[in-house]
Image: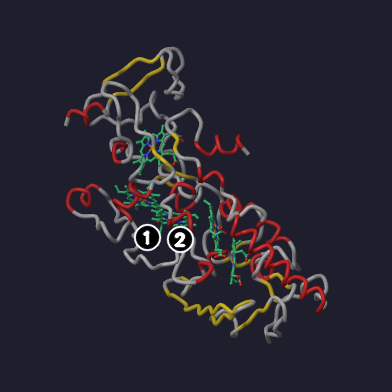
């Protein structure tokens, strides 16, 4: 109980009331009455104002769910590493169903996203438990508390900015969304017809979510087994092939792609600018792909940021620090 009440110690800056509450100088300790919120006009005043507020994160009295004090009488907290899953799984995992007091406290049931099934093919940052690479633990102006822009739903008018979340780590993938023809920018291509461009880059573009689950699912390349469409789930059967894949979906008739010997699918699509690659070019692209894959095995998706071990409280957000480094 003692360490709990210490949590309600709040710092007010003597001269300015700015919330750079972590500078060493001029700090005064103020003990709040137990039960008082950590969010007030002078403390963390900016919190809780965004469009989507995580009720677990920004109830001023519940900060201790994730922030543990280290020193008694001081407003110093344990550093939270990039691996935040241990906090999130208290409420969002199949393994720890929310019950008892916690259930009563929470006004809504938290969606369960961490499955017990260990064999699932998970998206690497999700598997590593780096939830806050994509979500803000407190609040956000982007839906599902995402830290960066990412379109909601299955259709979106195309812009590179709309996919900032994905491109942040998949550096250079913006090019894969901009070039109608390519022999190198993506493996999702039929000959040199770029199928990422074809699906995503248009006024009524399909979003990544149509095919990929951001947390990963049972398939190769995070391709999903079914797509949420209104209240229904439409099945999506994807089969990986040596040099491409095959997709059975309700969106169009079964379609196949092959990077080196393009398949002719009887599907009406808007004409792609540019011309088909020659047999010679396709042959060369196979060698280039093999080379790139070998390089990639050495140096997987360059998220050097993620290797950063820890961070703590500061006047800058972790993302601002990361951006400065780049
Ligand atoms: C659900 C877990 C969770 C809860 C609850 C929570 N936080 Fe945080 N907080 C985090 C994480 C995780 C970070 C580290 C930054 C990141 O990963 O985005 C953080 C960072 C911070 C920072 C450092 C700012 C920064 O961006 O580096 C402050 C200040 C802070 N939290 C205050 C609060 C206050 C005040 C409350 C209660 C109103 C609260 N937190 C509740 C998870 C939480
Ligand atoms: C104490 C329980 C609790 C903890 C811990 C917790 N959450 Fe939540 N979370 C909830 C509840 C309850 C909701 C649903 C209510 C809402 O929309 O805010 C929710 C909603 C969400 C949503 C949005 C879902 C939607 O439909 O908009 C995301 C994303 C999320 N949490 C991520 C996280 C992450 C990431 C962490 C760890 C840093 C975390 N949560 C920790 C209880 C928790
Ligand atoms: C690569 C980015 C990324 C990572 C890492 C990630 N998420 Fe998500 N998460 C998303 C996106 C995008 C959505 C929105 C999915 C949608 O609506 O299509 C989402 C949705 C959610 C939701 C809402 C689900 C619902 O049914 O409404 C919760 C809760 C959540 N994530 C928790 C977590 C937790 C916990 C972790 C860490 C173990 C995590 N996420 C890691 C991108 C990510
Ligand atoms: C925090 C960094 C991060 C973010 C954000 C991120 N990814 Fe990833 N993603 C990775 C890593 C790491 C891998 C592992 C494979 C690799 O190195 O390419 C990966 C792999 C993938 C793969 C599988 C590639 C394969 O060949 O199996 C797909 C598909 C993918 N991500 C899609 C997305 C989408 C869609 C988004 C946006 C919702 C996204 N990613 C956001 C880090 C990230
Ligand atoms: C129409 C379905 C579809 C859509 C929409 C889609 N993808 Fe993919 N994506 C795939 C398939 C299939 C693969 C696997 C290609 C292969 O290896 O044969 C893939 C592969 C990837 C890869 C691995 C590298 C590569 O290009 O081969 C990344 C990263 C990726 N997708 C990200 C995204 C992002 C980000 C979006 C949204 C902007 C998106 N995808 C939209 C189907 C899709």
**Is ligand 3 within 8 Å of the beta carbon of the residue shown at mark 2?**
yes
Q: Are marks 2 and 1 in contact (CB under 8 Å)?
A: yes
Residue 161 shows in the view: yes
Left or right side of 118 for 285: right
Q: For numbered disc 1, what is the local secondary structure? A: loop
Residue at 37%, 19% in the rendered image: 12
Up the image or down, 225 lies above or below 197; here it is: below
Up the image or down, 195 lies above or below 19; here it is: below
Q: Which mark is residue 24?
A: none
The residue beneath circle 1 is 113
Q: CA distance from mark 2 to mark 1?
A: 8 Å
The number of numbered discs placed on residues in the rendered structure image is 2
Percent x, y of residue 89? 32, 52
Residue at 51%, 44% in the rendered image: 307
Q: Which quadrant of the figure has residue 150?
A: bottom right
Residue at 66%, 60% in the rendered image: 158
Percent x, y of residue 2? 18, 28
Percent x, y of residue 26? 41, 12
Up the image or down, 162 lies above or below 121; here it is: above
- Of the pair 140 and 119, the residue shown nearer to us: 119
Q: For numbered disc 2, what is the local secondary structure? A: loop
The residue beneath circle 2 is 215
Up the image or down, 218 lies above or below 36; here it is: below
Q: Quadrant of ligand 4?
A: bottom right
Q: Which quadrant of the figure has residue 182?
A: bottom right
Q: On the rendered image, what quadrant is the N terminus found in?
A: top left
**Is ligand 3 within 8 Å of the beta carbon of the residue shown at mark 1?**
yes
């Amino acid at each position: 109980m003692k360490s709990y009440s210490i949590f309600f110690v709040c710092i007010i800056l003597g001269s300015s009331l700015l919330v750079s509450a972590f500078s060493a100088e001029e700090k005064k300790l103020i003990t709040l009455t137990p039960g008082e919120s950590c969010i007030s006009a002078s403390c963390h005043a900016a919190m809780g104002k965004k469009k989507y507020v995580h009720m677990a994160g920004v109830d001023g009295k519940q900060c201790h769910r994730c922030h543990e004090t280290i020193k008694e009488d001081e407003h110093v907290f344990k550093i939270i590493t990039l691996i935040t899953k241990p906090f999130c799984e208290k409420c969002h995992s199949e393994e720890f169903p929310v019950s008892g007091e916690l259930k009563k406290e929470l006004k809504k049931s938290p969606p369960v996203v961490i499955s017990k099934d260990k064999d699932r093919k998970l998206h690497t940052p999700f598997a590593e438990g780096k939830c806050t690479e994509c979500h803000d633990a407190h609040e956000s102006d982007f839906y599902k508390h995402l830290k960066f822009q990412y379109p909601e739903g299955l259709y979106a008018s195309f812009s590179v900015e709309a996919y900032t979340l994905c491109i942040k780590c998949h550096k250079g993938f913006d090019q894969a969304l901009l070039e109608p023809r390519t022999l190198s920018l993506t493996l999702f291509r039929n000959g040199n017809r770029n199928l990422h461009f074809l699906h995503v880059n248009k006024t009524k573009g399909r979003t990544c979510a149509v095919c990929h689950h951001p947390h990963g699912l049972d398939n190769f390349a995070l391709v999903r087994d079914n797509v949420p469409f209104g209240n229904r789930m439409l099945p999506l059967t994807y089969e990986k092939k040596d040099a491409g894949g095959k997709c059975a979906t309700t969106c169009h008739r079964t379609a196949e792609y092959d990077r080196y010997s393009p398949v002719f699918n009887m599907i009406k699509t808007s004409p792609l600018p540019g011309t088909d690659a020659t047999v010679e070019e396709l042959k060369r692209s196979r060698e280039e792909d093999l080379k790139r894959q070998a390089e990639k095995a050495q140096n997987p998706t360059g998220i050097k940021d993620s290797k950063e071990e820890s961070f703590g409280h500061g006047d800058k957000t972790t993302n601002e620090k990361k951006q400065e480094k780049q």
